[in-house]
Image (tube, rainbow, N blue to C red):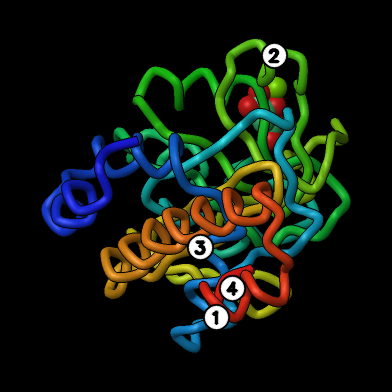
Amino acid sequence: MLEKNDLLDKIETMDDDELFDIMKKELYTGVLTDIMDTMDLRHQFLPAYIQPLNRDMMVAGRAFTVQEADVTGTRICAENREKPFGIMFEALDAMKKNDVYICTGSSPKYACFGGLMSTRMIKLGVAGAVVSGYTRDTKEVLSLGLPTFTRGCYAQDQGMRGRVIDYNCPIEFENGVLVNPGDIIFGDIDGVLSIPKKQEREIIRKAFEKVYGENEVRIAIENGMSVVEAFDKYGIM
Ligand SMILES: O=C([O-])CC(=O)C(=O)O
Ligand SMILES: [Mg+2]
């Protein structure tokens, strides 16, 4: 880990590559959610059922928001033509490096993420995928190594049941968490949260300060300090 003051000074001006890299190395959801709670940002954690496909997966990147909706059939009524998946292909091709495909709106009846989507994303340098629905082609997604956070694995197809109706728009998860395009999405073994773009550098700097503080508390407890005394002294748990 970089020296405390060097790192804290650099956070404000780091580019996204460096920022996401150091976040994945040093931060975790627990510390970020604690900091946002203290800033009265108490609705930033996506529903608890959204979990990594593989326990080691971590994601840090910019929200590329995708709105999914349930439908029956593949016909677009207004235009009277077939368009399975809606505008999902256009959305995928618009993604760029460090984006996180983050999608909600489908009911839990079908998969809205899979292997070919992952293959395209890897090609574009996308950071990962976070979907409130199911994932399919799980073996393929795992072998590609794209950090993927999902409700679970279930292959029933979205082709006849759902479609992407918008992207780069604000999206809302069923627990009321709002995600805007460009917000930072961070996920690990404990779930996924969203960090609002406007306050991101302050939140990340405070999270690093807390990590340094927790390291001091850990050493004190390892050396025999009681937790009452440790909390009195450091104000951290
Ligand atoms: O059908 C889907 O939703 C996605 C899929 O199978 C793939 O990406 O390979
Ligand atoms: Mg597939």
Q: Secondary structure at mark 4?
A: strand
Amino acid on which disc 3 is placed: Leu
Q: Quadrant of ligand 1?
A: top right
Which residue carries the number 3 mark?
Answer: 32
Q: CA distance from mark 2 to mark 3?
A: 31 Å
Crowding near the residue tagged with mark 2, few <14, some 14–19, many ≥20 C-alpha atoms within 10 Å: some
Whichever of labels 2 and 4 marks the residue nearer the N terminus, that label is 2
Whichever of labels 2 and 3 marks the residue nearer the N terminus, that label is 3
Query: Between 188 and 111, which is closer to the camera in this rendering?
Result: 188
Query: Between 51 and 218, which is closer to the camera in this rendering?
Result: 218
Crowding near the residue tagged with mark 1, few <14, some 14–19, many ≥20 C-alpha atoms within 10 Å: few
Can you tell which of label 4 and label 1 is closer to the viewer?
Answer: 1
Amino acid on which disc 4 is placed: Glu
The x, y position of residue 10, in whole percent, is 15, 50
Depicted 54 relative to depicted 19: above or below = above
Which residue carries the number 2 mark?
Answer: 140
Q: CA distance from mark 2 to mark 1?
A: 37 Å
**Which residue lies at the image location 66% right of the left edge and 20% below the top edge?**
141
Residue lying at the far left of the rendered structure: 13
Q: Secondary structure at mark 2?
A: helix
The residue at label 2 has a CB less than 8 Å from ligand 1: yes
Query: Between 103 and 190, which is closer to the camera in this rendering?
Result: 190
Whichever of labels 1 and 3 marks the residue nearer the N terminus, that label is 3
Q: Quadrant of residue 58?
A: top right
Which residue carries the number 4 mark?
Answer: 172
**Which residue lies at the image location 70% right of the left edge and 50% below the top edge?**
190
The x, y position of residue 136, in whole percent, is 77, 29
